[in-house]
Image (cartoon, rainbow, N blue to C red):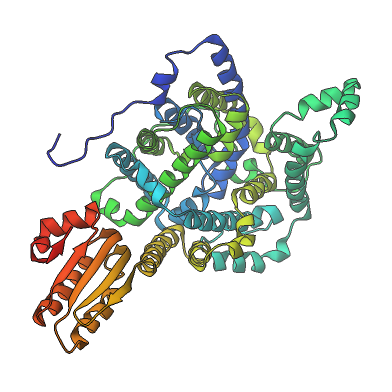
């Protein structure tokens, strides 16, 4: 261990702890939950990959490989990892601007960076991102996801969609004459079904008991427990296939999904390329860290499992993202929707996440040929539903309840995410957060005049005297300099919370102004931090009264 550096995080996957008191009952619950989540992940993984400009198998094998690694090595008990909707816009932009090979290099580099963040115990820093910034970029990503799905939802004949917001709108508008009513009908049916399916049996309990007496209705009720995206995928694909609807499918665009294991491939790698990909790498790492740790916090709130280890979780995310690109995968992170499904299905340990990956692999290897019949409009409907649930739309209506600072950070992050990209949005949000925090803290500090005589001025200090608030010492200096005779100044620092070096410099300038005119400066009631700084700097020795 290098002297002066903080201790490194120990690599302790949560799985090793959860298996200590493992039993058959927990195994049965984890297998059931894992199988359920594996089925739910099937349409989502394909949809996320296609929307990102990749082949559907890229999303599937990312969910399988990264999902297994994140569960096996992660710092949470029930979180499910894999491709996420938040990455769609980022990945699509990187592929269009830099190409697929460079996406893989960026993902590997982001994986290394994520691992180092966890190793050096920086996982808690993600919590410093203000909630207004998180809500702003999450809502912005949701809008961009919805916009990117208009091509397939409307069935438009567009060869390739651009990545930026205004170009996408212009492209959709130019090709609106190729509107396919059959594709649109399937997409609308999918969206409506996804909203209605969970509510089919949310009826009055007495009426429900009466319905359950009917055998057919009871069977239907049993099927209502199936995940809505799977039901939509199967039923609407059957409708399109049986009716031979003229809509684009996975088979017509991608030629289907290979019924085989992915091939290990090394992307063309050079340090020159890595240097050019700094921005995409930071974007993937930042988004992956924020999404995974936010997801882990949600899992903590919804489950009875021990609280997550943020550093171990980042290290697991790093390993997963460093591995999947070699099998043609895409960036992965924690996924809230699948994690919540996992918890509600009864998961108790990371074994459920590993079963989810195994279930998905089994489905891909056995039923891959059937995927070629899935209409892209149905997958677009699934993603529109995901985008709707992803956004915190109620927060816009609640803006009037918060301060102008909160509104500025949230709205600006939201708009910049849409118009520019996530990296710029988060950077702007963090800069605004820092600037507005400094301003707010500077407003809190004040120097209140308590008493004034010909020989002495007494002031009481409140708050933090730091670089953003030092201007409020100027009136004391002006009062000293305007006095026709020497004057002593007494500062009551009982309510002074903290002091930085700029604040200390302001007090030193005040001391010089006072002594220059023959007066003395005294400070009483100092708290520990200001006292320590004054003593270490030697300023305390120059004060007339210091206590």
Provide residue 504's location: percent of width, then percent of height: 19, 66
Tell me the quadrant of the picture where the C terminus can be found.
bottom left
**Looking at the image, is 346 positioned above or below residue 185?**
above
Q: Quadrant of residue 458?
A: bottom left
Q: Nearer the viewer, residue 195 or 544?
A: 544
Residue placed at 59% from the left, 18% from the top?
A: 29
Give me the residue at 60% from left, 52% from top. 391
Q: Is residue 187 left or right of residue 291?
A: right
Is there any visible trace of residue 479 in the rendered image? yes
Instruction: Locate residue 172, reporting x and y percent.
Output: 64, 64
In the foreground, 383 or 527: 527
Residue at the spot x=72%, y=65% of the render? 177
Where is residue 388 drawn, in percent x and y? 65, 51
Q: Is residue 180 or residue 387 the one in the foreground?
A: 387
Looking at the image, residue 426 sits to the left or right of residue 175; the answer is left
Residue 223 picture location, percent across and down: 77, 27
Residue at (45, 31) in percent of width and height: 307
């Amino acid at each position: 261990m290098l002297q002066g550096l903080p201790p490194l995080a120990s690599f302790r996957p949560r799985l090793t702890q959860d298996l200590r008191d493992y039993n058959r009952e927990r195994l049965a619950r984890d297998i059931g939950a894992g199988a359920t989540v594996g089925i739910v992940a099937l349409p989502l993984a394909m949809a996320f990959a296609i929307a990102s400009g990749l082949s559907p198998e890229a999303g599937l094998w990312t969910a399988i490989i990264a999902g297994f690694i994140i569960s096996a090595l992660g710092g949470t008990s029930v979180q499910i990892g894999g491709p996420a909707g938040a990455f769609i816009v980022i990945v699509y932009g990187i592929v269009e601007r830099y190409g697929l090979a460079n996406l893989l290099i960026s993902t590997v580099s982001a994986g290394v960076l994520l691992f180092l963040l966890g190793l050096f115990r920086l996982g808690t820093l993600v919590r410093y991102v203000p909630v207004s910034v998180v809500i702003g970029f999450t809502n912005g990503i949701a809008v961009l996801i919805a916009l990117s799905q208009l091509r397939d939802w409307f069935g438009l004949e567009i060869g390739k969609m651009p990545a930026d917001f205004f170009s996408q709108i212009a492209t959709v508008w130019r090709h609106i004459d190729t509107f396919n009513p059959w594709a649109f009908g399937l997409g609308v049916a999918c969206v409506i079904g996804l909203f209605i399916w969970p509510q089919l049996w949310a009826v009055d309990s007495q009426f429900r008991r009466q319905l359950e007496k009917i055998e057919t209705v009871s069977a239907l009720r049993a099927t209502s427990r199936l995940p809505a995206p799977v039901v939509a995928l199967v039923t609407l694909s059957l409708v399109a296939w049986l009716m031979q609807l003229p809509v684009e499918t996975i088979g017509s665009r991608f030629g289907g999904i290979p019924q085989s294991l992915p091939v290990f491939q090394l992307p063309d790698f050079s340090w020159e390329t890595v240097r050019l990909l700094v921005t995409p790498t930071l974007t993937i790492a930042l988004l992956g860290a924020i999404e995974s740790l936010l997801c882990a916090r949600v899992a903590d709130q919804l489950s009875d499992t021990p609280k997550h280890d943020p550093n171990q979780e980042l290290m697991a995310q790093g390993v997963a993202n460093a591995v999947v690109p070699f099998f043609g995968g895409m960036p992965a992170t924690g996924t809230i929707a699948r994690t919540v499904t996992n918890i509600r299905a009864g998961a108790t340990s990371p074994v459920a996440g590993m079963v989810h990956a195994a279930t998905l692999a089994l489905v891909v290897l056995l039923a891959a040929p059937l995927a070629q019949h899935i209409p892209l409009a149905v997958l677009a409907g699934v993603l529109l539903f995901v985008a709707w649930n992803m956004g915190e739309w109620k927060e816009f209506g609640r803006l009037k309840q918060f301060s102008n600072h909160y509104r500025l950070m949230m709205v600006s992050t939201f708009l910049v995410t849409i118009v520019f990209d996530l990296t710029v949005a988060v950077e702007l949000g963090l800069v605004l957060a820092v600037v507005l925090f400094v301003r707010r803290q500077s407003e809190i500090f004040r120097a209140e005049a308590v008493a004034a005589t010909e020989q002495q001025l007494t002031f009481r200090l409140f708050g933090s005297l730091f670089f953003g608030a030092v201007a409020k010492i100027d009136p004391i200096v002006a009062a000293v300099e305007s006095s026709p005779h020497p004057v002593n100044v007494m500062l009551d620092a009982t309510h002074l919370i903290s002091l930085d070096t700029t604040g200390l410099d302001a007090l030193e300038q005040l001391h010089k102004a006072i002594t220059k005119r023959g007066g003395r400066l005294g400070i009483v009631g100092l708290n520990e931090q200001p006292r320590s700084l004054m003593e270490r700097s030697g300023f305390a020795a120059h004060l007339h009264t210091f206590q």
